[in-house]
């Protein structure tokens, strides 16, 4: 009897392994085909439309190439990581389903296909979160996340269908063309509904808790979630960029994204587990992406979501190795000498100037200045980390910033400009806004928040520390609820 059971178990594992390999090869084939077509036809990619249902252009191929790459990498990793896992076949099937639903979303022109693919994305991701049905907390996290995803689908449907029935147009391109003939109140309500759908999926405050609770998902599912799923908000907002301009809701996006980015960076510092730190980091990055949309740079938001996907997929898939090699250490005290301060300031300004010259953002007095400020802060922070690193020599500290920042900003500029070319036939994706008092005020708030964070002032304000800790807690039923023998 035991021999028969062992034989059956080995047969199931073999079938899982075969299906896993086939699914992985299929995803790599999809990626190779998309990448090959993108390279051979760049930059002259013609738009193709099929009866108002499907639409394929440069933006479609760009997102297809990105999402199939992440899915292929995750599937290759999962082939070994989930070996022997009883739900391995289910995981691979859900991964395929999620990838296809994203591809359908990006190529959708008919509103019903758009809504169905958005719904499918949420259902597949909820199932991936709770793939291990024997784990009670995972099941609770899955149900909790699915409620948010269904709410997002409801708001998206309300916004899109309101426009469709008021304009009698049922394609995305038709809706955009008909905006001028619709009342401003209808346009605003529809835009607000679509914004709510986007910020739910990208886990903006106060809809962030589903992502913090979803850490029960297997590591490959978490990588796919953080590299692909949450980025769907950027895709959605880009598709409806004209609506957002027409509804005058960009400032709202800017405020939501900006405050989320600041709060999430604070909450990240309070986390004690790797996955929770990564979750807070993702929320902050999504906040920055939404903020870029609010500044009128939808092309920058798309470039950001692509780069964030690479970065976050790597961090999740290498999390185990990072934990293994980490050692407890005391936090460094913020003490900087005048010469070090000069170096940090110098490279911060140099990085901002290089960024402005290569991308064109920040060369005029408009909303692009704010993005250049973020780059200056980022480069200054990285420079500070280098000059305070005791293991580096003085020569290395002098050379590393130049090498890293020139190459890093150069690669970003290359990707940014390539994305801009591929999105050239899409309306309203690069429209810098006039610099406003709100943006200036928020820039000041951002700088104040940055120094409060770096100097650790928040740790000396008990009510603030407790508030940040409470809002960064996952859903109560997704942690330590069930007993296992």
Image (spheres, rainbow, N blue to C red):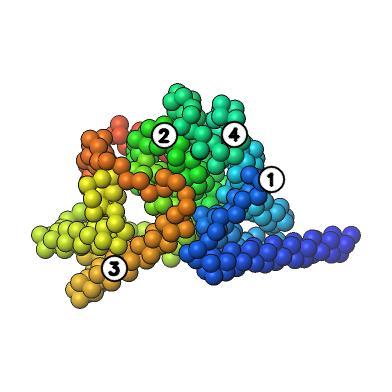
Looking at the rendered image, the disc whose residue lies closer to the viewer, 1 or 4, is: 4
Q: Secondary structure at mark 2?
A: helix
Q: Quadrant of the C terminus?
A: top right
Q: Earlier in the sequence, mark 2 or mark 4?
A: 4
Q: Position of residue 273 (x, y in %)?
A: 45, 50
**Which disc is residue 406 wearing?**
3
**Distance CA(mark 2)–CA(mark 1):** 49 Å
The residue at the far left in this view is 338
The residue depicted at 61 percent of the width and 51 percent of the height is 49
Q: Earlier in the sequence, mark 1 or mark 3?
A: 1
The residue depicted at 46 percent of the width and 24 percent of the height is 183
**Distance CA(mark 4)–CA(mark 3):** 48 Å
Give the residue pinned by disc 2. Answer: 246
Q: Is residue 370 left or right of residue 100?
A: left
**Distance CA(mark 1)–CA(mark 3):** 50 Å
Location of residue 4 with respect to 108 vertically, above or below: below
Q: Quadrant of the N terminus?
A: bottom right
**Distance CA(mark 3)–CA(mark 2):** 38 Å
Looking at the rendered image, the disc whose residue lies closer to the viewer, 1 or 3, is: 3
Q: Earlier in the sequence, mark 2 or mark 1?
A: 1
Give the residue pinned by disc 4. Answer: 169
**Where is residue 185, by image quadrant?**
top left
Looking at the rendered image, the disc whose residue lies closer to the viewer, 2 or 1, is: 2
Q: Secondary structure at mark 3?
A: helix
Q: Is residue 257 left or right of residue 226?
A: left
């Amino acid at each position: 009897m035991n021999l028969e059971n062992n034989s059956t178990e080995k047969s199931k594992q073999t079938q899982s392994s075969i299906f896993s390999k086939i699914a992985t090869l299929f995803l790599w084939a999809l990626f190779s085909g998309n990448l090959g077509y993108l390279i051979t036809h760049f930059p002259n990619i013609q738009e193709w439309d099929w009866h108002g249902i499907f639409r394929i252009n440069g933006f479609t191929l760009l997102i297809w190439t990105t999402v199939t790459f992440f899915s292929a990498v995750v599937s290759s990793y999962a082939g070994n990581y989930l070996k022997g896992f009883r739900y391995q076949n289910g995981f691979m099937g859900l991964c395929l389903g999620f990838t296809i639903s994203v591809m359908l979303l990006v190529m959708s022109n008919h509103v019903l296909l758009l809504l169905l693919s958005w719904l499918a994305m949420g259902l597949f991701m909820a199932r991936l979160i709770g793939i291990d049905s024997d784990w009670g907390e995972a099941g609770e996290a899955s149900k909790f996340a699915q409620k948010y995803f269904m709410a997002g689908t409801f708001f998206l449907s309300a916004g899109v269908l309101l426009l469709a029935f008021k304009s009698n147009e049922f394609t995305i391109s038709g809706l955009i063309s008909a905006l001028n003939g619709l009342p401003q109140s209808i346009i605003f309500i529809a835009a607000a509904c679509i914004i709510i759908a986007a910020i739910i999926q990208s886990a903006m405050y106060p809809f962030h808790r589903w992502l913090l609770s979803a850490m029960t998902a297997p590591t490959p599912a978490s990588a796919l979630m953080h590299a692909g799923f949450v980025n769907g908000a950027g895709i959605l907002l880009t598709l409806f960029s004209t609506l957002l301009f027409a509804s005058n809701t960009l400032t709202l996006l800017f405020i939501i994204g900006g405050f989320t980015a600041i709060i999430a960076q604070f909450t990240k510092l309070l986390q004690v587990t790797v996955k929770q730190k990564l979750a807070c980091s993702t929320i902050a990055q999504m906040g920055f992406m939404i903020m870029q949309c609010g500044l009128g740079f939808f092309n920058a938001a798309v470039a950001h979501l692509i780069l964030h996907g690479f970065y976050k997929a790597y961090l999740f898939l290498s999390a185990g190795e990072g934990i293994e090699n980490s050692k407890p250490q005391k936090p460094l005290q913020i003490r900087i000498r005048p010469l070090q301060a000069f170096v940090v300031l110098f490279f911060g300004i140099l990085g901002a100037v290089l960024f402005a010259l290569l991308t064109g953002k920040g060369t005029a007095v408009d909303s692009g200045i704010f993005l250049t400020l973020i780059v200056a802060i980022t480069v200054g922070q990285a420079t500070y980390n280098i000059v305070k690193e005791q293991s580096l020599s003085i020569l290395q500290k002098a050379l590393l910033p130049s090498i890293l920042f020139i190459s890093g900003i150069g690669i970003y500029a290359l990707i940014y400009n390539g994305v801009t070319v591929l999105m050239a036939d899409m309306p309203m994706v690069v429209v810098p806004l006039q610099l406003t008092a709100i943006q200036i005020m928020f820039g000041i708030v951002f700088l104040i928040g940055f120094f409060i964070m770096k100097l650790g002032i928040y740790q000396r304000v008990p009510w603030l520390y407790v508030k940040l800790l409470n809002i960064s807690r996952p859903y109560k039923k997704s942690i330590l609820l069930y007993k296992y023998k």
